[in-house]
Image (cartoon, rainbow, N blue to C red):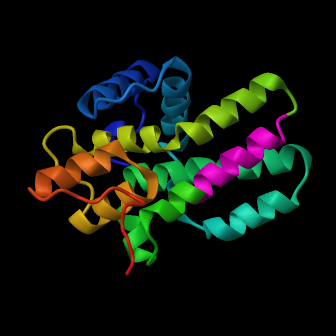
Amino acid sequence: MPELMVGTSTAQWQALVSEAESACRRSLGEEMQSYLVFLLMRFARRTEVAAGVLALEYLNGVLLSGRQRLDQLQEVGDKCLLYSGLFPHRAERRRVKISYYVDLGRSAFSQLAANGRAATQYALYQNVADTFVPMMDVLQAMRTQGGAVAVLTPLQALELWQDTGSARALEELRQTTSGTPIPPGRLQRH
């Protein structure tokens, strides 16, 4: 995370998320915006976020019970959101598609929703699972604020759009080429 972001107040994080929402023409709603702000605050000082293998952390979380299970699955889901949004090139280095993190993160939050003890807990985690891609889009927009270069390569943008329906990936793809990408599921095999 850039040094400037470390120690940033809640209001500053909120402003940054709001600006990114505007930049990518996404509206997360108050609950998901707050979730994203607190996620960024929680991980801003944690340098060990990149350690570990998420698939193993996910499997370990599924095997746990009670509070440990909830904590582990939320940790996995949150890391997947950060990787896919703020660090998408990490996927390339690990030789996986960005949608791997999206699928794993959505699955972790869906597991949390299925195991939520209270209706509000279920609703929150289901909302995060359902809004994962728009939140990823907002995080990617944060990276390009201030004139930074595109977050995704053209191939990553195409794959991410086809795999997840990411509106931001499609926008990046349209800035790269004048061609019309084929929507997911429209490819016919002969």
Query: Is 106 part of what is drawn in magenta?
Result: yes
Q: Residue at x 85, y 26 (%)?
A: 118
Note whether residue 15 is visible: yes
Query: Is 20 part of what is drawn in magenta?
Result: no
Q: Is residue 91 above or below residue 31?
A: below
For residue 106, side relative to residue 9 (left or right): right
Residue 187 in percent (x, y) is at 36, 67
Q: Main secondary structure of the magenta part?
A: helix
For residue 139, side relative to residue 175 (left or right): right
Q: Residue furthest left?
A: 178
Residue situated in front as seen by the camera: 69 or 1: 69
Residue 132 in percent (x, y) is at 52, 42
Q: Residue at x 46, y 22 (%)?
A: 10
Q: Specify the quadrant of the image occupied by residue 112.
A: top right
Q: Residue at x 76, y 66 (%)?
A: 59
Q: Specify the quadrant of the image occupied by residue 19.
A: top left
For residue 167, side relative to residue 102 (left or right): left
Q: Residue at x 30, y 39 (%)?
A: 142
What span is in magenta?
104-116
Residue 68 in percent (x, y) is at 84, 49
Note whether residue 149 is visible: no
Residue situated in front as seen by the camera: 141 or 49: 141
Q: Is residue 86 above or below residue 116?
A: below
